[in-house]
Image (cartoon, rainbow, N blue to C red):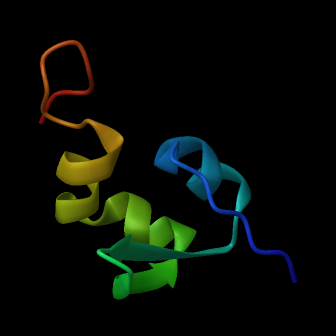
Amino acid sequence: TMLIVEQNARMALNFSQRGYVLETGSIVLSGSSEELIANREVQRAYLGKGRKGFLED
């Protein structure tokens, strides 16, 4: 087991099996990397999906 604290969510989720989303020091979401990558809230808030210059819906 290894704990990685990383600001680059896309990179961290690409090589991890599980992830946790923290906001103001509290876990607000957790799941497998695949679940988090597929989560629309995670995509919009942390992975840049939908922003100009990034992946589009």
Q: Name the residue: 43% across, 84% down.
A: 30
Q: From the viewer's perspective, is 6 left or right of 41?
A: right
Percent x, y for residue 55? 26, 27
Quarter residue 54 falls in: top left
Name above or below for residue 15 compared with residue 18. Answer: above
Quarter residue 4 falls in: bottom right
Name above or below for residue 1 compared with residue 34. Answer: below
Q: How many marks?
A: 0
Q: From the viewer's perspective, is 25 left or right of 6?
A: left
Q: Residue furthest front?
A: 24
Identify which residue, 35 or 42, lies in the foreground.
Answer: 42
Q: Name the residue: 16% across, 28% down.
A: 56
Name above or below for residue 33 compared with residue 44. Answer: below
Q: Residue furthest right?
A: 1
Quarter residue 29 falls in: bottom left
Percent x, y for residue 47? 34, 43
Name above or below for residue 43 compared with residue 53. Answer: below
Percent x, y for residue 28? 29, 85
Q: From the viewer's perspective, is 4 left or right of 54?
A: right
Q: Name the residue: 60% across, 42% down.
A: 11
Q: Give the position of the C terminus as an image quadrant.
A: top left
Q: Give the position of the N terminus as an image quadrant.
A: bottom right
Q: Residue furthest top?
A: 53
Q: From the viewer's perspective, is 14 left or right of 27?
A: right
Q: Name the residue: 41% across, 59% down.
A: 37
Identify which residue, 16 or 34, lies in the foreground.
Answer: 16
Percent x, y for residue 15? 72, 54
